[in-house]
Image: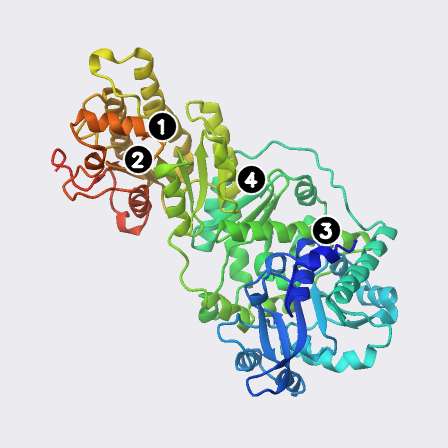
Amino acid sequence: MKSLWDDAEAARYHGPLGPRVYASRLLGRDKSLVLHGGGNTSVKLRERNLFGEHEEVLYVKGSGWDLETIEPEGFTPVALAPLRRLATLPALGDREMMNELGTRLLRAGAPSPSVETLLHAILPHQYVDHTHADAILSLGGAPDGEKRVRDLYGDEAVVIPYVMSGFKLAARCAQEFPKQAGKRTIGMVLLSHGIVSFGADARESYERMIRLVSMAEDYLERNNARVTAHRAPQGAAAKREEIAALRRAIAEAAGFPVALRTSEAAKFLAFARHPELARLSQQGPATPDHVLFTKPWPMLGRDVSEFARNYRAYFERHAPQSEQVKTMLDPAPRMVLDPQLGFAAVGRTAREAAIVEELYDHTIDAILGAEALGGWTALPERDIFDVEYWDLEQAKLRSGGSPPVFAGEVVLVTGAASGIGKACVEAFLARGAAVAALDRNPAIEGMWKRVDVLGIVCDLTDRGAASASLDRAVRAFGGIDMLVLNAGIFPSSQPVESIAPDAWKRAMEVNVEANLALLQLCHPLLKLAPHGGRIVVIGSRNVPAPGVGAAAYSASKAALNQLARVAALEWAKDGIRINSLHPDAVYDTGLWTEDLLAARAKAYNLSVAQYRKRNLLKTEVSSKDVAALAAEMCGPLFAKTTGAQVPVDGGNERVV
């Protein structure tokens, strides 16, 4: 591991917290040190208050901030002197501790201080860094882990046996640090928890962290315990229906929809085929800090119904008997390991599933490193249980509020790069769904840089391309719960006698046949949707009220409408509901060019401005208006509606 410190880059970070922010971001860049909101950093500053008095202030990373992207406002200022007094108390409950920390905040609106704030406070150094370095976890989890760590670091690091985060850990460190620390001490190893470094300035503390972790990495290297290459022969890839069925089984065990993110990467396949998988995967996480995100379940087979039964039985054996506690638990596994599938990460959202995947990616490294040193040993089950059902963790779960309406669900939107389709992506994201966004426009791949949107370039008239797109969507999110059929074309205006055969054929190919193919491909997935499949067809006002010169478009949309009605009749038995929206006067879409708008206005003897509002309410309908209703039609308000056709047109006398 090498230092990434760059003086020129550091100089761009200004103010008292500038060096603290820069060094924190350097740590956050390295995923072998810090993952998704993990790790903590702090700095102690002497500041003048409103009375002109100097006081010591601890700025510690606030809850909800990630070191890789932290800003100055992500550090919570807390009065230092009272914190150090708290650490001297003989006992203090963690909820009491968090209350005391909250009363010592020096900035209104600051994020909640970390549960490890007292640990930072008791150390006498100005800058403190704390990470969950993979190499340290491997070393500590090996046989005689504590002895190995002490022998490696000598008097360069204080070593603290495992104590759960919070007041007990801070109090233990306050007692042990003065006894063990010497002139050469630059850090502290918290067994099964991570490593702390400190220094007089940000660079010193950061580079001491790099030095300490590098020493552990070198130790693993010398003992052939750093696994850098994974070899696993590729098996037959799981079919998308199998993945969707697995997701359905997990959702049934959990009691709510989940996102399922699969990976056939060599590391995951090799670990899933490890001869000691059952032992290695079931001992516990590399660090209890990850316990809520790393509850593995070795599936060891493809019978998903058996998997669901087995997991329910497992949970009933291990869950607390208290009904009050049970209501707060998430009974679903966080991941599945299967010799053929490889790895599947589970989360209540796509973002959470991505966190699980990244955490377990590094957990495998920690486990295999320790195994190569003689055998991986996690903490006792009692310690892991204490963290999982820790009052502070359960309070965090309770404070999260109700999940968004589409949490854990997946929608596929076609024609998603512009207009109504793009607005639909935003509408479903706002309601918590993960989105597979399809479009012919290559720009779709980079429109949303977030883990809950998968932009896919796809020509829907190519059935093979559509099928491949579904494979990608299901591997990313686990299935398809909702489908918005939005993609379409509007041929140039022509009277019936002048319609070119190719123009007619193209309208039918894009507006009808491509949608039929996608419906057929999605049907098996929609049947497996935990809350039932839902389809919204973006039709047109031209279905009930065709327009002059728009025969090809009107006929193709009418055919799609009839297809949707028949599908609603046939697929109701599968729990799939299908409803149609008929927009009109929506001009912020890719279908409408200035020339086309002018031509249509001329056909009605109207100006363009008049044509835009040619409805009973004299209003203009936007893509967002249509998208909002499309999302609502997939939600609980329309749970008992199928086969409906709803206009979104401001009122049209030919329709009304």
Q: How is the image coloured?
A: rainbow
Q: Which mark is residue 537?
A: 2
Identify the amino acid type marked 1: Asn
Residue at position x 65%, y 61% in the image: 13
Relative horizontal placement of residue 399, taking residue 140 as reference (left or right): left
Query: Marks 2 and 4: in contact by CB < 8 Å?
Result: no
Circle 4 SS class: loop
Q: Amino acid at mark 4?
A: Arg
Q: Nearer the viewer, mark 3 or mark 1?
A: 1
Residue 278 x %, y %: 67, 51
- Which numbered disc, 4 or 1, marks the residue that appears first in the sequence? 4
Q: Earlier in the sequence, mark 2 or mark 1?
A: 1
Q: Quadrant of residue 599?
A: top left
Query: Which disc number belongs to residue 365?
Result: 3
Q: Which residue is mark 1?
A: 515
Which residue is nearer to you in this view: 303 or 328? 328
Mark 4 and mark 1 residues within 8 Å of each other at the beta carbon: no
